[in-house]
Structures are given as C-alpha cells and as structure tokens.
Image (tube, rainbow, N blue to C red):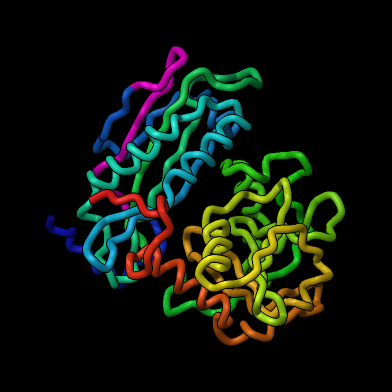
Amino acid sequence: MQKKDINWGELGFGYQVTEARYVSEYKDGSWDEGRITEDANIVLNECAGVLQYAQTVFEGLKAYTTEDGRIVCFRPDLNAARLVDSCRRLEIPPFPEDRFVEAVVETVKANAAYVPPYGSGATLYIRPYIFGTNPVIGVKPADEYQFRIFVTPVGPYFKGGVKPIVIRVSDVDRAAPHGTGDIKAGLNYAMSLHNIVDAHAKGFDENMYLDPATRTKVEETGGANFIFVSADGQTLITPKSGSILPSITRRSLMYVAEHYLGMKVEHREVLFSELDNFSECGLCGTAAVISPVGKINDHGREICFPSGMEDMGPVTRKLYETLTGIQMGHIEAPEGWIKEIL
C-alpha cells in the first residue's frame, strides 16, 4: 500500500480532510446498514435538533502503525461502550457496540494510506460522533440521527517534546452535580471554552476544576483526567467522582501501573488539600497520553511537584513509555487491548 505524500514529521495536532468517512442514519426507529462515503460535507435543516438543543455526543481514539508494520487501534470496545452511555444520557438511540468497532475498522481501512508510518511520531486520529438531524423546535429529543466517523492524520500533541505545564485552579464549574460531566457530550466542552481562553490569556495552560458541590475535591480539566503519584513514588492516585469523564487512557494507566510497574493504585476522592503531598501530577487523555503538570496556581499560591518541574517525572515517564510501548507494539499488550485492522 502506497502512503500519501505527507511530511509526517511536520504534522501538528489539527484537522485535514481524508478520502473516506463512515455514515449511518437513524430513521423510523432503527439504524440503517451504514456506508463509506467520500463526501466530507453535512447538509442539515436550519432547525435540526443538534443546532437547536446541542443533542450530540462523540468519541476520540487513534490508529497506529506498530513496530512490525501492522495497523491497529487501541481498545475501541471501550469507546463503543462509553458512546452508548453518552447516548442514553442525551436520549439518543445508541449505536450498537459491535457495529461501532466494525465501523472504525472499515473507516481506517478505507483511509489506510493516511495512517502515519511507525517512528514518525504521528498517528491517525479517529472521531466517531452522533447528532440529531431532523427539525426540532419544541424542547424534546430528535427523531432522526446520523452516526459518522471521520479520520485525520495528526502529529504529537506537544511539538518539540513534552514539557511540564502550569495550570490554575478554576473559579468556574465545569459540570453540575448529577449533571452530564461523566459523558462525552459536546455541550460539556462548550462549557469550558471561555474558561480555557481566559486561562491562556493569563499565561496558564489549563484549568483545574474542583467538585461543584463543595469545591474541596479535585475533578478534571476541560478535556483530561488527573493522575497523581505519591511522595514515595509507589502509588498512583486518580480522582473519583460522578461528574468526571471515565477516561479510557486513565483506566489503562491504572492497569499499567499495577500490572506492569508493580505500583499500588487508588481510585478515590482526592482532596485539594492533599496536593502538597504528591510528587508528580499529570493530565491523561487520548491526544497526549500524559501531559506532565509542573505546578498549580491557586490564586497566587503555587503548588509545585518536585519530580516534574523541569521534565516529566520518573514515574510518569515510565507510565507513558509503557502505555505507548503497548500501543506501538513493542511491549506485549493485555488480551483484548489491541484491535488489528491491517
């Protein structure tokens, strides 16, 4: 297979159109059989449910070229299951989980020439999403939907290497108690847009959101879960809350920490007052895998993580290298983690 003539090493983390995408439509109570199309454009009625009441959910995952030349993706079954949870919360008919995985495979195969080669530092980002399509003027769920997948080749999230970032404690709440913070809906990300623009304007890389009820517990950022390392480097701690998105990367890192690195793992409520006791902090997600945090600014008071001020901390680096090694095929993966495409 001939790869596209792309300067893979110069790719940033942005969108570029590829040749094929997957589309399935929901009408009269069922999803159709789906198809691959070359048309990248969507035509909607001006009163479409997604435009009026933000009825849309999405996922994000990647396809990789492994060291031995295979094209694979990482744990797509978990993305399929999470999309179902998101759909149910927004009264969207769920797309069947087995068909989701089949659609991912079909879409990546149709765009195999865009999957970056091993060692390039680039990957193929995969974006499945569902949205209401028919006109809806009263406040109610749509009756018709589209499930779509597009892909785009992307470079590393951080050009020039991973450097510790500086984040601030937010005065804005990302999600409401008993709200939609635990699903991957477009409306949740819209809630954080003004706040992240404001953070950047004031010299910060991200926001740390606290629990909206008491503002004493760590939740997440606008698009990533937190991980912390204990002072002795022996325990990985991840915040637990009903309004945190259940990150697939975070769950995978917890498994890697316990079963590959022999660490203790705690998934629990994390008090903001505990942060001074941790040696390392990171943000985890599909795009960057782990973004190390050097310090947190709490309204002028700085909380510094001694093992991650200048570079990724030693435990965070082991977690990062082990997980990416599994994804790229030079470390043996747990059963079911790698879906082979080609």
> In the shown orientation, is residue 125 left or right of residue 303?
left
Whether the magenta-drawn stretch holds residue 30 is answered as yes
Which residue is located at x 72 percent, y 74 percent? 296
> In the shown orientation, is residue 176 left or right of residue 53?
right
Above or below, 58 relative to 235 = above
Which residue is located at x 53 percent, y 38 percent? 57
Above or below, 143 relative to 44 = above
Which residue is located at x 63 percent, y 45 percent? 188
Whether the magenta-drawn stretch holds residue 86 is answered as no
> In the shown orientation, is residue 149 left or right of residue 222?
left
**Which segment did they paint magenta?**
16-32
| Quarter of the figure that contains the N terminus | bottom left
In this view, the residue in front, 267 or 298, is 267
Residue 127 in the image: state x and y as whole percent.
Answer: 42, 46
Q: How many marks?
A: 0
Above or below, 170 relative to 180 = below
Residue 7 in the image: state x and y as whole percent.
Answer: 24, 69
